[in-house]
Image (spheres, grey):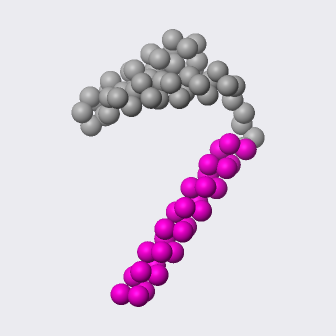
Amino acid sequence: MRIAKTSLTFAAVIILVGTSMRLTLAQDGPIKISRLRSDSIHTCGTAAAKFPDYSWGNTEMFIYRACMTGHRQQE
């Protein structure tokens, strides 16, 4: 039982560290995007999230693509 708890704790720490490293690399990485593109991705992602794939099929992707096109951005 103690080994299982230790393994679970270790796995949780690895996941947290990995997630924070990915976020840091994504923010400070060599690829920079404009504020307009960042805002467009956020806005369109939020709009598309209202239509999850499991209940609406391809609607989520169509909404996202149409929104990005409306913002004159590549998807």
Where is residue 33? Give x, y as percent: 69, 29
Residue at (38% x, 21% y) in the render: 62
Left or right: where does residue 53 sit relative to residue 66?
left
Task: Examine the structure image and report whether residue 56 is included in the region drawn in magenta.
Answer: no
The location of residue 31, given as percent across then percent down, is: 71, 37
- Predominant SS along the magenta part: helix
- Which residue does the image show at 72% across and 33% down from the upper left? 32
Q: Which residue lies furthest to the left in this view?
A: 55
Residue furthest to the right: 30
Task: Out of 19 and 57, give the one closest to the viewer.
Answer: 19
Q: Quadrant of residue 47?
A: top left
**67 relative position to 19: left or right:** left
Given residues 11 and 62, the one toward you in this image is 11
- Rendering quarter of residue 21: bottom right
Q: Identify which residue, 30 or 1, lies in the foreground.
A: 1
The residue lying at 41 percent from left, 88 percent from top is: 2
Q: What stretch is highlighted in magenta?
A: 1-28
Q: Quadrant of residue 53?
A: top left
Residue 3, placed above or below residue 48: below
Q: Which residue lies furthest to the bottom in this view?
A: 2
Counting every numbered tag in the picture gives: 0
Instruction: Give above or below for 54 relative to 35.
Output: below
Q: In this view, does 27 lie above or below 35?
A: below
Q: Which residue is drawn at 39% across and 82% down?
A: 4
Nearer to us in this view, 24 or 57: 24
- Residue 2 magenta-highlighted: yes
Question: Residue 19, how many percent across, how many down?
Answer: 56, 55
Q: In this view, does 30 lie above or below 1?
A: above
Is the N terminus in the top left, top right, bottom left or bottom right quadrant? bottom left
